């Protein structure tokens, strides 16, 4: 399975800042925004990742992440020369996807909670169809809303409905089978002049193959689309890291816990940025790993995370508490 981060767009809602800087490189507290969606794909077990961005921003993102080898990843890049909608990612990345299943996440989405490893794995191993993720919101009129049947399949999706049939908003994370590029090629631009991801989802829905994973109580979904949301996300991360004493979306830690890199490489990555608290966290982790096992299975555990336990990765980007 391939992963895609869509980090393009004009980002006008963050002007004047994004007139000079990529939105995905803006800090969300102590790390670049793009670390958060990247961590989700890593926790899904994906190592082949395509980043799609603008002609101006692609070199800067490449300067940050390079080819991903330092994290045990294989990162490629494609340019989207104009914002043509989310679904255009499958046209831009068709040659990269090469008929495989894929996951797409938007570059400004942040997920937090417990047990994301299991949720993502369930979507990743689905043999056919598409999977979207639903998040309960109090103002469904502002979102794309999905109605969910008793078998977990979508019954309908509506964009910003005046009379919503549910409170489940579709977030910016999608898993698709090998049909997605053909479906994308069949689309026509909407009235906004864009290729709409909802149209792809509706094609899967028409075939009875659109599944929904629900993010129940305890999840947090943040979309850093404007200055207020960006500030709220930074404060959210700051409070959690201060209270719980581990780092959210620490891609170096995730790479180690998932077995993509070893302790020697983890220590090397921390040494390169050791003057920052983030770098010192990685170095401290590297020292502790000589005394504790590296168990990716710990990502799915339900126990309370210790300061540097494998469970902390699980909570780095999403959650799966019981519904009460």
Image (cartoon, helix red, strand yellow):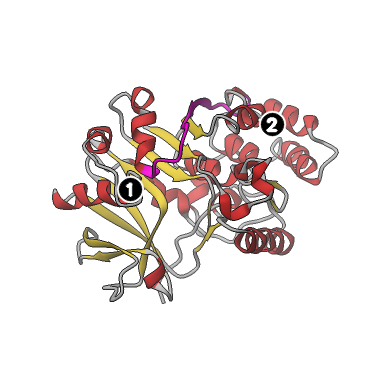
Q: Secondary structure at mark 2?
A: helix
Q: Residue at x 34, y 34 (%)?
A: 90
Q: Residue at x 61, y 39 (%)?
A: 251
Q: Residue at x 69, y 63 (%)?
A: 235
The residue identified by callout 2 is 266
Residue 64 spot, x, y in % from top left: 66, 31
- Label of residue 197 in the image: 1
Relative height, residue 37 to residue 229 (above, below): above
Relative height, residue 302 to residue 265 (above, below): below
- Report if residue 76 lies within the magenta region: yes
C-alpha separation, residue under disc 2 versus residue under disc 1: 37 Å
- Magenta stretch: give its range: 70-86
Which tag, 2 or 1, sits closer to the chain's start? 1
Relative height, residue 177 to residue 164 (above, below): above
Q: Nearer the viewer, residue 279 or 155?
A: 155
| Residue farthest right in this picture | 275
């Amino acid at each position: 399975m391939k992963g895609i981060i869509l980090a393009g767009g004009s980002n006008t809602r963050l002007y004047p800042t994004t007139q000079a800087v990529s939105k995905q490189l803006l800090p969300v507290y102590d790390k670049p925004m793009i670390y958060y969606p990247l961590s989700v794909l890593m926790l899904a077990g994906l190592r082949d990742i395509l980043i799609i961005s603008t002609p101006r921003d692609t070199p800067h993102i490449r300067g940050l992440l390079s080819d991903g080898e330092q994290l045990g990843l294989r990162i490629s890049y494609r340019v989207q020369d104009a914002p043509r909608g989310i679904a255009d990612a499958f046209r831009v990345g068709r040659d990269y996807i090469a008929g495989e299943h894929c996951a797409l996440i938007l570059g400004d989405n942040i997920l937090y909670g417990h047990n994301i490893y299991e949720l993502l794995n369930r979507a990743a191993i689905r043999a056919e169809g598409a999977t979207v993720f639903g998040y309960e919101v109090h103002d469904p009129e502002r979102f794309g809303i999905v109605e969910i049947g008793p078998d977990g399949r979508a019954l309908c999706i509506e964009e910003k409905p005046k009379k919503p049939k549910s409170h489940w908003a579709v977030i910016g994370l999608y898993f698709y089978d090998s049909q997605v590029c053909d479906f994308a090629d069949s689309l026509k631009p909407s009235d906004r002049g864009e290729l709409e991801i909802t149209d792809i989802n509706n094609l899967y829905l028409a075939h009875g193959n659109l599944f929904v994973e629900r993010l129940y109580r305890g999840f947090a979904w943040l979309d850093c689309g404007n200055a207020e949301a960006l500030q709220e996300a930074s404060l959210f991360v700051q409070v959690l890291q201060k209270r719980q004493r581990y780092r959210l979306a620490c891609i170096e830690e995730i790479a180690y816990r998932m077995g993509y890199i070893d302790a020697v490489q983890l220590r090397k990555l921390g040494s390169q940025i050791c003057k920052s608290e983030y770098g010192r966290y990685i170095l401290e982790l590297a020292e502790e790993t000589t005394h504790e096992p590296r168990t990716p299975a710990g990502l799915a555990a339900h126990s309370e995370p210790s300061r540097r336990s494998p469970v902390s990765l699980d909570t780095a980007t999403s959650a799966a508490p019981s519904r009460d």
